[in-house]
């Protein structure tokens, strides 16, 4: 019996009928799919599997917390936002911090399911008295950050937490993001565009009640132990000083720093946009809920206050487009936040356009007089605006790099770096076979958060295509989703080595359910197989478990790894071994009936393979 952590209630809102109702979740469902990403993926399987597109009114937008969200756990503020993705056409999700998840649970709900389409722009207001839809016509066209400020004034409460979209979401840009509490973004897979298609400008929540906990004394003891451990780590001081930006220097040294649309793997000006630079520029550190790491930094850029940039943003609005000024990178970061766009995809699109122009694939009349040279900050700023508003060249780029390459034509596909339609995130994998496999097999497309395996490549050898690397990728693809299901940040584990057993103990103390870590990881495996099955039903499988040609065909041209590139033959052997170890069909790349039944997904097996 569940005694805490979970509330067992979600809010379902139909924007077409303007109805909002509370729904109860069964204990079996809650435990089997854990929470967060797990719950969202199951609901999408049940309710959105066969929608025609991400913008179909029947496509659900799912916002889910986890059983640890809002409790005494370092970084327990994470929320999963999921839907069928406009970028890929398959399951998509993004994870975001801030206080929205904490306040949503304090308002009495584990999550929100949004369905239908509103006739006019609206926002959803949730508090202890219930939920109501209010007009957002006065907010339509406003930026994400501006919308948050206006709504806080309208509601008369600066402590309200909210999810907002900007013009990019309204204009259905495929990589539109959702902003939470100014400095946090659900960035990847275009969840902001799904929200925009539903004409939902914002979700605001005010929570005032406590969250039940099965064993509060043990929870507090565990939190104290975890905090003491984290504070004992010497590395914590570097996080206070530089945050995630320290990874710029690390990636530069490791020759995996995307530069000039991944043409290069090092950037001559890396130090100008990395950890040392942000340490000097920051106004103050910014911490997340109950977390001592303070990995976010507040800076000022061209008169704007920016929480960031962080590593991926500094890559895609810095080295990958050739910007060498931290202020320019931070201002581009602010523009993306206000316009409501994923910094990874937005920067990737600009770098793609720059290389196409450099190679003569874009004519001057197509770029409307813009100088698309790498390193031109004004062009970066202008293109961000143009993409968000679908103007000129921005309209060509606004549906993602896969579609942009089709429109530009010629040999541009060669320079469009994506997997399954999602732009590759911030690691050059030409000398990183494990990370390459992680990108190729990620259920949402090439995103590092599915399995950050590149450190293992460095540990055991950059040129090795071994079975242990395959096993490590699979392991990470089970561990990392668990954090998204529990509703906590993974950085205390990834960066400071907080023992995974802590999270098992936190879960038991929160819920009263006696469960071992191995059982939680089995649930993660169930969820990964489920999202893979969603892709299979929607036509994405083995043929899409590939990588951009550049990683196989264009050797790293300079630096300590000059000449390195992936071996297609050895990579395919790793992929075959991956399917074998996962229990997936080597011909289709989909989970076998036996594997699905083993994981308690009999109905999914029947859908994929027919009943009986």
Image: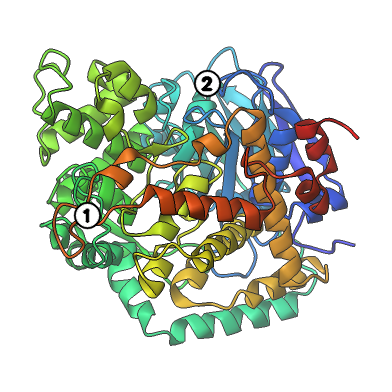
Work out whether 115 lies above or below 228. above
Image height check: is 183 above or below 401?
Answer: below
Report the colour scheme. Answer: rainbow
Nearer to the camera, 269 or 217: 269
224 or 563: nearer the eye?
Answer: 563
State the residue at coordinates (19%, 68%): 276
* Residue 609, x across and y down, in percent: 78, 33
Q: Position of residue 101 (x, y in %)?
A: 60, 51
Q: Image point 81% across, 53% down: which residue?
A: 598
Eye-nearest disc, 2 or 1: 1
Q: Is residue 432 left or right of residue 609?
A: left
Quarter holding residue 580: bottom right
From the image, which quarter does the N terminus lie in? bottom right
Structural distance between the alpha carbons of marks 2 and 1: 38 Å
80 left or right of 612 in image: left
In which image quadrant can residue 134 be found? top right
Of mark 2 and mark 1, the one earlier in the sequence is: 2
Q: Is residue 377 visible?
A: yes
Q: Crowdedness of circle 1 by 10 Å Cα count: few (<14), some, many (20+)?
A: many
Q: Which residue carries the number 2 mark? A: 197
**The C terminus is located in which quarter?**
top right
- At label 2, counting other C-alpha atoms closer than 10 Å, the crowd grade (few under 14, some 14-19, many 20 or more) is many
Checking the image for residue 265, the label placed there is 1
What secondary structure is marked by label 2? helix
Q: Is residue 177 above or below residue 215?
A: above
* Residue 591 place in picture, x, y as percent: 70, 45
């Amino acid at each position: 019996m569940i005694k805490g952590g979970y509330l067992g209630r979600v809010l379902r809102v139909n924007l077409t009928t303007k109805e909002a109702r509370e729904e109860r979740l069964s204990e079996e469902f809650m435990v089997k799919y854990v929470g967060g990403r797990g719950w969202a993926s199951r609901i999408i399987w049940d309710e959105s599997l066969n929608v025609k597109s991400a913008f179909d009114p029947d496509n659900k937008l799912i916002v889910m917390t986890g059983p640890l969200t809002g409790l005494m756990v370092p970084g327990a503020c994470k929320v999963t936002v999921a839907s069928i993705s406009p970028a890929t056409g398959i399951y998509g999700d993004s994870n975001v911090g801030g206080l929205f998840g904490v306040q949503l649970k304090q308002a009495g709900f584990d999550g929100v399911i949004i369905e239908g389409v509103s006739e006019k722009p609206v926002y959803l207001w949730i508090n202890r008295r219930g939920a109501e839809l209010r007009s957002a016509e006065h907010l339509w066209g406003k930026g994400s950050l501006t919308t948050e400020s206006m709504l806080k004034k309208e509601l008369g409460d600066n402590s309200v937490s909210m999810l907002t979209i900007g013009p990019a979401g309204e204009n259905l840009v495929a990589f539109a993001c959702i902003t939470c509490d100014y400095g946090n973004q659900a960035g990847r897979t275009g969840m902001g565009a799904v929200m925009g298609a539903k004409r939902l400008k914002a979700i605001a929540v005010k929570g005032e009640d406590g969250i039940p906990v099965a064993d509060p004394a043990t929870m507090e003891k565990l939190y104290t132990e975890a905090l003491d451990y984290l504070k004992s780590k010497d590395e914590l001081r570097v996080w206070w000083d530089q945050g995630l930006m320290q990874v710029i220097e690390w990636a530069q040294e490791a020759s995996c720093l995307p530069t000039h649309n991944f043409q290069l793997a090092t950037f001559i000006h890396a130090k100008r946009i990395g950890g040392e630079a942000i340490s000097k520029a920051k106004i103050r550190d910014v911490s997340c809920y109950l977390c001592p790491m303070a990995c976010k930094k507040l800076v000022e850029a061209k008169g704007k206050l920016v929480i960031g940039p962080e590593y991926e943003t500094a890559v895609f609005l810095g080295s990958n487009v050739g910007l060498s000024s931290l202020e320019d990178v931070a201002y581009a970061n602010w523009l993306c936040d206000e316009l409501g766009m994923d910094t990874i995809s937005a920067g990737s699109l600009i770098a793609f356009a720059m290389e196409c122009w450099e190679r003569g694939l874009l004519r001057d009349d197509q770029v409307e007089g813009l100088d698309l040279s790498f390193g031109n900050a004004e062009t970066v700023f202008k293109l961000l605006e143009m993409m968000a508003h679908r103007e000129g060249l921005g309209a060509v780029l606004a549906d993602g790099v896969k579609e942009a390459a089709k429109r530009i034509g010629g040999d541009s596909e060669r320079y469009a770096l994506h997997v399954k339609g999602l732009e590759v995130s911030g690691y050059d994998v030409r000398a990183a076979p494990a990370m390459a496999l992680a990108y190729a097999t990620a259920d949402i497309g090439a995103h590092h958060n599915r399995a950050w395996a590149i450190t293992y490549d460095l540990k055991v050898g950059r040129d090795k295509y071994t079975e242990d690397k395959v096993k490590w990728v699979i392991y990470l693809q089970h561990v990392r989703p668990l954090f998204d299901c529990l509703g906590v940040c993974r950085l205390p584990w990834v960066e400071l080595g907080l023992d995974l057993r802590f999270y098992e103990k936190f879960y038991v103390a929160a819920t009263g359910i006696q469960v071992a870590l191995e059982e939680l990881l089995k649930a993660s495996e169930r969820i990964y197989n489920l999202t893979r099955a969603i892709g299979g039903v929607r036509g994405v499988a083995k043929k899409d478990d590939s990588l951009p040609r550049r990683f196989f065909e264009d050797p790293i041209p300079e630096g300590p790894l000059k000449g390195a590139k992936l071996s297609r033959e050895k990579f395919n052997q790793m992929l075959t071994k991956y399917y074998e170890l996962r229990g997936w069909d080597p011909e289709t790349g989909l989970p076998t009936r036996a594997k699905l039944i083993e994981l308690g997904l009999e109905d999914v097996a029947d859908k994929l393979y027919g009943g009986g």
